Image (spheres, helix red, strand yellow):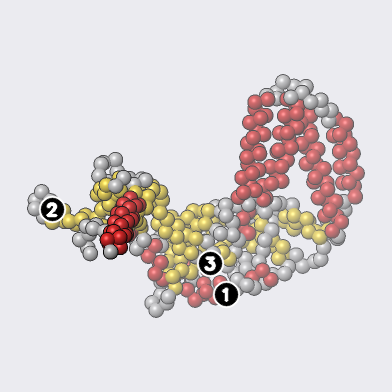
Amino acid sequence: MKSKVFKILIALVSVGILIGIGFQVFTAFYDPYESVTVKQGTYEKKVDLDGYFVRDEKAIAVEQSGAISYQYKNGERAARDAELLRIYKDEETLQALEQLEELTSSREILSQIDQGIGSDGLNLDLVKRQLNEVRTSLMHAVDDGSFSELGTLSEQLLLCLNRYKLCIGEDLSLSKTISALDEEIASLSKTIPEPDDVIKTDNPGYFCTAGDGLESTLTPQTISTLTIDSIQTTLNKKENAPSEGTSTVGKMVYSNTWYFVAVIDAADATYFEKGKTIPLSFSSHDSETVTTTVVNVLIEDGKEQAAVVLQGDTVNAELLSMRFESPSAVVLSYSGIIVPKDAVRVQRNVTEEGYSENQRIVYALLGKTVRTRKLDIIYENDEIVVSRPSEESGYVSAYDQVIIKGRELNDTTQ
């Protein structure tokens, strides 16, 4: 009997010890708070647009058959009466022209290198710096998708590499190679016939190889008569636009001022005010972000959508080729300490005059201690608040660990 009682006592003591150990482990690892680390940054509110470009432009149409040789690159500016296109009978002529251009380019590079042979004008440090700059530009062009720049940058890289060889003492004799190229260029030039037709520009402007047949329809003169329905009707042409003008082989853009017309949700119309500067980011061209100005906002009663007209003056090959696009518009931008809305509490204070006032704060963890941090809110929405950075003590700072959930937190709004 005593043995049985003794065993029961031992079991109870063992259970008590296990419970005590478990409680110590629990208290050691138990954290009554859920927190996040806040950082300083920029909060941007973006609105997605669905729209199209309007420009002062004219389509270039070619009715006759033949092979077309473009005399200007996409985005280049052409003077009045400049030759834009040359039309030849067959593709073989275009291949010969392309080969001639490559030979001429190679000859130019070798000629520049040859001018440095035997001179003291080549400085090794300068050539190294130029080589690194061109290599960096080439890498950025690839990363940004600026493929139109690759040809020029590749030529510059070849030029710098050969200059580097000269600087380190490699023996280069280019006169024979240049003479051979001259002979080949002269021989090939004799095989190229005169073009069947030449198309010139009537006015100076920017040349673009992409035409869609809408150049005479989407003109700046239509901006003043736009309605939400007419904009939507134009957007409905998105799928058919590329095939509308089969004879269109390019276009001339006569002004660097253009318009982007877009529909938006009516609830977002308040973000667009006349005269406001709006950056646009185009998802189809990751490197393309341009600054525009709001020139008109269309709001009609009973419609779930509104419309906005933006004006820009940036001109490059990518933008000239665009027609229907869905960019993001940055309508708000605030820099400061970005704090989750779940971390914001309200603290009731009594002023020196005896008045009661509510102040929004956060609780920050310092080790195991909880401290109050004030907010100087410059922007807020349902998800975050942006607090102005302050050098005064007592305000929330970057890398504070603020509590978003926990027990026994004072909040007069709850």
Specify the farthest residue to the bottom: 302
Q: Report the amino acid beneath label 1.
A: Asn
Please name the residue shown 78% across and 41% down the image. 105
Image depth: mark 2 or mark 3 in front: 2
Name the residue carrying label 2. Answer: 350
Query: Viewer-proximal residue, 25 or 113?
Result: 25
Distance from Cα at disc 3 to Cα at disc 1: 10 Å
Q: Which residue is mark 3?
A: 51
Front residue of 159/348: it is: 348
Give the Cα distance between marks 2 and 3. Answer: 53 Å
| Residue 336 in sight | no
Q: Tell whether 69 sits left or right of 125.
A: right
Q: Earlier in the sequence, mark 2 or mark 1?
A: 1
- The percent position of residue 298, horizontal first and vertical second, equals 43, 70
Q: Position of residue 407 (x, y in %)?
A: 26, 59
Residue 250 visible here:
yes
Q: Tell me the distance, in whole angstroms, between the alpha carbons under discs 2 and 1.
A: 61 Å
Q: Which image quadrant: the N terminus? A: bottom left
Q: Mark 2 vs mark 1: give the one in front.
A: 2
Q: Amino acid at mark 3?
A: Gly
Dot 3: what SS?
strand
- Looking at the rendered structure, which numbered label has been put on residue 236? 1
Instruction: Give the number of marks.
Output: 3
List x then y, in percent, for residue 345.
26, 57
Q: Residue shown at 73%/33% (left/top)?
A: 161
